[in-house]
Structures are given as C-alpha cells and as structure tokens.
Amino acid sequence: MPNTEHRRTHADYAQLADQIRRWGEQLGFRHVGIADTDLSRAEAGLLDWLAAGRHGTMDYMARHGTRRSRPAELVPGTISIISTRLDYWPSAADAAAVLADPALAYVSRYALGRDYHKLMRTRLARLAERIAEAIGPFGYRVFTDSAPVLEKPLAAKAGLGWVGRHTNLLTRDGSWFFLGEIYTDLPLPPDAPTASHCGRCTACVDACPTRAITADGKIDARLCISYLTIEHDGAIPVALRALLGNRIYGCDDCQLCCPWNRFARPTGEPDFAPRHGLDAASLTTLFQWDEAAFLTRMEGSAIRRIGHERWLRNLAVALGNAPSTPEVVRALEGRRDHASPLVREHVAWALARHARDDIPPRKEA
C-alpha cells in the first residue's frame, strides 16, 4: 500500500464516509460500512479453532498466522476497512424441493451463476477509484474471499450484520450475500456494530446434516459438507457419505432453515442467475460430463476450481444416495474403471450401496 499523507479533519472524513456509503450503493452494493482494525476478540476465537484442528486439511489457514486477524500485518499502513455486501439469492428452482428429490443434484445457491470473485473485485475497484477521484491518491487494496481476511468479523464491526450461530454473517433480511473489503490508509470513522438477533434459536444447529455446527456456535470443517465437497481434495469419510444426500457442491441447510432468510429478496444481478440448469439438474446427467464438457460448461463458475475429479467424486456419493434405478446403476457402472483411484473408490462405494439395497426409502411428503 502506498504511503500517502492525508490532511483532513475528522469532519471531512465523516463526510467522506457518508459519500463512500452512497457511492457503494450506486454501484450495487446492498450495504457499505466501515470498521477499524482491532480484531483481537475474533483472533482469540480463530486461534482456539485452529488449535482444536477444526480447520481440517486447510493448512494454509494456520500458515497465515495473525495476518488474517491483524489487517496491518497483511497490508502495512491499513487504518480502516470498508466492508461491503452484495446480495446473490437467485430466482431459481425451489431449493427445498431440489433437496427433497434424491434424483436431482443440489448446488449451493451462491454457485449457480458466474463466479462472484471477479464481479466483486471489479465493483470494489470502482469504489476505490471513485474515492481517489474525490480526494486524490490513497493507499488501498481490495479483497473478496481472496486473501487471509476475517471478513465476517470485519463486516460485523462495520455494522453490516452479526455473526450468527452458523458463523455466517446474518441480517434482518437474511444471509444470502457475498462480502468484500477495501483495506485503506484513510482514518475513516468506524460504524457501530449490530447486536445479535439470534436469541435462543438453534434452527441452524438442529438442521445441519452432519452436526458440523458445534454447541459453542462454531463450525467443525471436518464435518461440514461445504468443506467436504469443495475444499477437501481426498476421500470423503465413509461415515459421512450417506449424510451428504444429493449435495454435490456446498450446502445451504443452515441458511435455508434460518427464520431471518424468510425476508430475503432475489438479487437483481443477472450474473448470479442459474446457468446450465444447475439449480435442478439430474445427477445422472451431470455425471456423464467428461472433463472437456465440465471445463467448458463451468467456465466462469466458482465450481470449476474443484476440478473434474472432485466433481465426479461428489456426484458418485450423491448417486450412491439416490434411488436404486437402472439409470443410476448404469451411470455408476460407466465410471467403474475411471482413471482416477479417488473416483473409482467412491463409485465402488455407491455401487455397493445399490447392490445391498440399503438406501433408505424416500419419505413421502
């Protein structure tokens, strides 16, 4: 970050902060807030979480050390953080209905459209450029889930919402949004944090298929379906496979059950609209995609980064949990001799499930 000198009064910065909020909203951000850099409380929780091994195989989280919780260590000169929210809830097939149909593939709603990283970074860069147009050059860097940043605690400090029991940022109109940050060397006045409104509700804890949300309101990544289907690159633990159901990329259960998400509104961002019918695609159809088809159809999608091998691994588990139909068994048989040992092992597990016919019957509504 450049070392720039700013000669303005507190009142000037308060006015600038108001302008930044307006400019952000004009760029399509639903909410813009400002936080200071003190994350000492969040740091203590992070270090305890890492010490307990709840990060699973995400070793990079431990390697980052305190850069994640001390913004000025990540970007020297950082004094304040501009935190932004961009809504993504799409107009798509009913999520609950897809989850209830074991022949369909459930994809986390955030990943149905185009990858949010580029869109968010572009919007954040435009906001930073607008600030520079008004005050001249200043030091900044933009982030959106792209560096060791404690984005949810920062957003909570900036008044964008509160960290819910499921560890997602939550507001009175839900949690279906992305977060992005601008680290700056501007001494902007911080916003007041928002009080928690979870109360005694434990809907997310009770709804989690693998009980990944712990009693103290933290996530054990080793049990989390989002971690298992996206971040984890090895075999999915056998004891957890049946619990994944038809979830092939991520999991939204803790958000779908949240009472506050009843007030969520669909996004107006066309880039977040479902592509390739992923909001309600059949498992067998997706399992037939070869690597070339996967790479082509997932171009510009967040899903592409898991690669074709993990894509097939996840689908094999879901097919193992699907009804025993000739179509499902044929699809699995077609991948029995796949070049990847990882895929072969999950296909063999799925076929063994169908051979034993030990898949619980679907409950009628």
Image (cartoon, grey):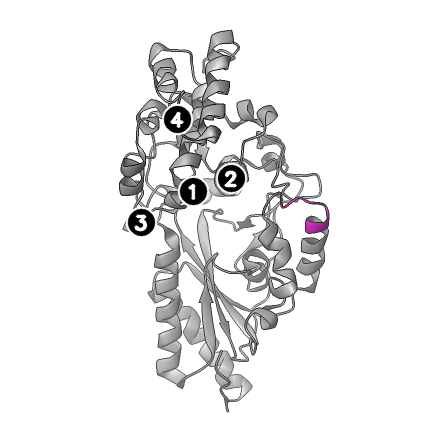
**Nearer-N-terminus badge (2/1):** 2
Main SS, magenta residues:
loop
**Alpha carbon distance from label 4 to label 3:** 26 Å
Please give the range of residues in magenta: 50-55
Q: CA distance from mark 1 to mark 3?
A: 13 Å
Tag 2 near tag 4, CB within 8 Å:
no
- Of labels 2 and 4, the one closer to you: 4
Instruction: Name the residue carrying label 1.
Output: 306
Q: Position of residue 133 (x, y in %)?
A: 35, 81
Q: Which residue is the extreme one toward the bottom? A: 7
Q: x and y percent of residue 155 in the render?
A: 54, 60
Looking at marks 2 and 4 on the same chain, the residue that comes earlier in the sequence is marked by 2
When the figure is inspected, residue 138 is found, relative to residue 101, above or below; the finding is below
Residue 363 in view in this figure: no
Report the residue marked by disc 4.
338
Question: Label 2: how many residues lie within 10 Å, few (<14), some (14-19) or many (20+)?
Answer: some
Q: Are marks 4 and 3 in contact (CB under 8 Å)?
A: no
The residue that disc 3 covers is 300
- Which is in the foreground here, disc 4 or disc 1? 4
Residue marked by disc 2: 233
How far across and down, in percent of the image, does residue 337 sit?
A: 40, 22
How much space separates mark 2 and mark 3, taking CA atoms? 21 Å
SS category of the residue bearing label 4: loop
Residue drawn where x is 33% and y is 37% of the image: 92
Q: Secondary structure at mark 2?
A: loop
